[in-house]
Amino acid sequence: MEHNHEMDFEATKYMNCNRTLKPHVQREIEFNRKAKIRMNATITSAVRQVGGYENLGWIENDAYNYLNNIRRHELEGDNAQAMLTFFAKLQESYDDFFHVIVF
């Protein structure tokens, strides 16, 4: 197959198939979430540990997507109690958050 542009092999690390959150990074995201440490602080910490963004092996969206998957699985199965607990935690964390559930 011919390309109409030169291939940039340095950019291949940003392709989806080459980006992975290693298990220790996943655990760090989960621990920091439970400790109520914001995601941007978690990402900054990971960047400093490896010496820069180019050494991460993943991009910021991968970390946010992982966190969203964790949240989604917590609410999986139409578990109303889990949803109420989740909304209560949000309301504690954010003064502007308000929820009403009508059965």
Image: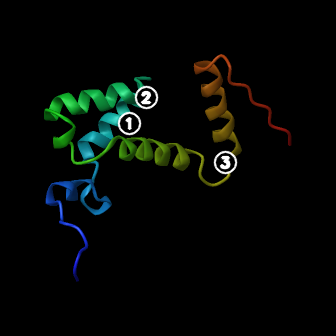
Marked residue nearer the N-terminal end (3 or 1) = 1
- Residue density around tag 3, few if under 14, some if 14–19, many if 20 or more, within 10 Å: few
Figure disc tally: 3
Judged from the image, the secondary structure of the residue bearing numbered disc 2 is: helix
Q: Quadrant of residue 13?
A: bottom left
* Of residues 4 and 42, the one drawn nearer to the viewer in this rendering: 4
Q: Quadrant of residue 27?
A: top left
Question: What residue does disc 2 label?
Answer: 34
Location of the C terminus (image quadrant): top right
- Residue density around tag 1, few if under 14, some if 14–19, many if 20 or more, within 10 Å: some
Query: Mark on residue 30?
Result: 1
- Kind of residue sitting beneath label 2: Lys
Foreground label between 3 and 1? 1
Marked residue nearer the N-terminal end (2 or 3) = 2
Location of the N terminus (image quadrant): bottom left
- Kind of residue sitting beneath label 3: Asn
* Of residues 58 and 85, the one drawn nearer to the viewer in this rendering: 58
Question: What residue does disc 3 label?
Answer: 79
Residues marked 3 and 1 touching at CB (< 8 Å): no
Q: Estimate the x, y position of residue 62 in percent, counting from the top left.
A: 37, 47
Q: Estimate the x, y position of residue 5 in percent, counting from the top left.
A: 23, 68
